[in-house]
Image: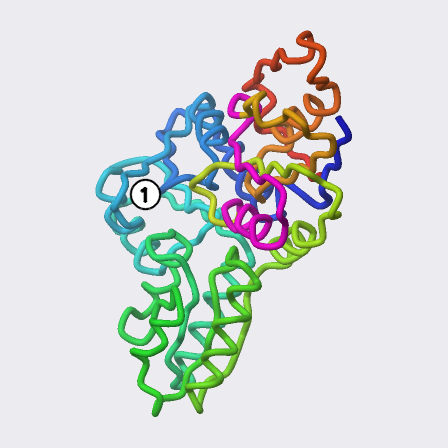
Amino acid sequence: MLVKGIVPRGYCKGVVRAIEIAKKQAHQTTPVYILGMIVHNQYIVNALEDLGIQTIDIKGKTRLELLDEINEGKVIITAHGASQKVFDKAKEKGLEVIDASCLDVIKTHDLIQDKLNEGYEILYIGKKGHPEAEGAISIDEKRIHLITNRDDLKTIDPTKKYVMTNQTTMSLYDVYDLCEKAKEILPFVEIEKETCTATKIRQEAIKNIEDDVDIIFIVGDPHSNNTRKLASIAHDYHTCDVYMIESIEDLEIEWLKNKRHAAVSSGASTPTYLTNQVIDYLKQFDINDSKTYQKPIIDKNKILNQKDA
């Protein structure tokens, strides 16, 4: 099978930084916890647990509430960032705080705080319940408004002045649409788009996949917002089959029947090792040769390898 590995793909700088920070805490005598998933990929979470670093992640609980589960040791703030309230509470509990927040997320938090200090309210484009959005909104829950779709804009008071910004992993096309709509209906709105560069160029690469590709694979964890956005963009801009898979284990042979040209990309928190397994497997695959059907075994010791693709 002809296979195109979409470039760039895989780890962004924020993910590399977060994983490296976490790895330095391996096998400590003091308990080490991560407040939520360090990045949204279960393979990475499992690999870190093998190093003695426990992830505290309970569905429906905020980062502030998750701190109630930790009473001693060190706590790592994930790449998605957290509000000052989380840092303060952790320190009040006597925990050592290790900040692995993505620098782009910190930049957005600083922007929000600066604009709040200037008297603006904030329109924050994000995904409800996502830890990055949670961290941003909790800076000031009264003056920061979560915008998930156009309908949310109808509830906004048009007489106030706003700055509109966004979760760094949102679709740049969705962000553009919501910003244009906000400019139509809100006379006092300023736009500060904060989609990170890694997200932008990965999304643009997916949009620009060649028309002769007849199947697209996006490798990544279903928890990952940026991975889901890549799959969504692939569906929106291409008529071929699109599949989002966590790893080679999810790939179905049936999908490859009558397919000749595949494209493969992955979310910014997907280990390059897992993506390369999919690419290598497809390259050797021949629908007429059952010997090529056998899938490789995932070596968990290679999950934390830090490589960009």
Between residues 3 and 255, which one lies in front from this camera angle?
Answer: 255
Residue 87 part of the magenta segment: no
On-image quarter of the N terminus: top right
Give the percent coordinates (x, y) of residue 36.
37, 41
| Left or right of 150 in this view: 217 | right
Name the residue at 39% across, 46% down.
Answer: 97
Toward the front, the furthest residue is 258
Image height of 36 relative to 83, above or below: above
User: Disc 1 on helix, strand or loop?
Assistant: loop
Q: Residue at x 69, y 12 (%)?
A: 292
Residue 176 drawn at (x, y percent): 55, 70
Q: Nearer the viewer, residue 109 or 91?
A: 109
Q: In front: 80, or 285?
A: 285
Report the residue marked by disc 1.
95
Q: Quadrant of residue 172?
A: bottom right
Q: Which residues are magenta?
A: 227-250
Kind of residue sitting beneath label 1:
Leu
Please rate how many residues cluster around mark 1, counting C-alpha atoms within 10 Å: few if below 14, some from 14 to 19, many from 20.
Answer: many
Q: Is residue 229 magenta?
A: yes
Q: Position of residue 91 (x, y in %)?
A: 31, 50
Residue lying at 27% horizontally and 53% vertically, measured from the top left: 89
